[in-house]
Image: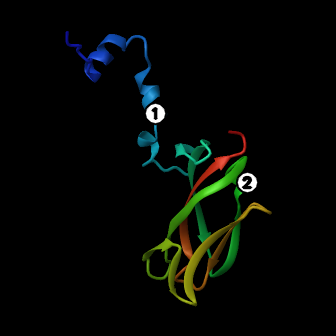
Amino acid sequence: MSMQVPTGVSLWTEYKDHVDFLNITKQHKEVYSNEYSTTEEIIVGKWINDKPIYRQVIEYTASAGESYIVLSNYISNLDTITTMYGTTIQPTTNNITTIPYYYNSSDYSMLFYMPSNGRLIIRCGSSYGAGDMRIVLEYTKTTD
């Protein structure tokens, strides 16, 4: 006696009126992993402690030297930053560089986070490292 295993189509046909397949799909990383937003937090996966990982993009214009962003103005209940990176449009050339960016000891840009005061520090060695930034943060929250 052989058993016939149902296919995805036959399962959908049989259960489409009883299961919300769209919401099941949205809970998986594959759906959200390529989405970016400056206005909302997007869940993009799970961290090693099974907490959801959120993603948000912060737009910021940096000058040469050091400046900072107070992350609580953008993200509530921040727990752990898992990833941070971005791009800068250099104002004098309109070239696009990555963050971090390093050309030499006076031409660079970098990010680091200080949990003690909630600041995301931005350091730019010259006007080539500074400019209009799009900083991508992926993080967990204390409330999850």
Task: Tell me the mark number nearer the camera, choosing from 2 and 1.
Answer: 1
Quadrant assignment, res 2: top left
Q: Residue at x 67, y 54 (%)?
A: 80
Using the image as rendered, state which of residue 12 and residue 98 is in the foreground.
Answer: 12
In the displayed structure, 140 sits above or below 20; it is below
Using the image as rendered, state which of residue 62 and residue 5 is in the foreground.
Answer: 5
Crowding near pointer 2: few (<14 within 10 Å), some, many (20+)?
few
Direction from residue 105 to residue 142 in the image, left or right: right
Q: Which residue is drawn at 23% across and 15% down?
A: 4
Q: Is mark 1 on a helix, strand or loop?
A: helix
Q: Residue at x 42, y 26 (%)?
A: 22
Q: Earlier in the sequence, mark 2 or mark 1?
A: 1
Where residue 30 appears, x then y in whole percent?
41, 42
Report whether residue 39 is seen.
Answer: no
Q: Locate the C terminus and report the quarter of the image it occupies.
A: top right
For disc 2, the marked residue is 72
Report whether residue 107 is seen.
Answer: yes
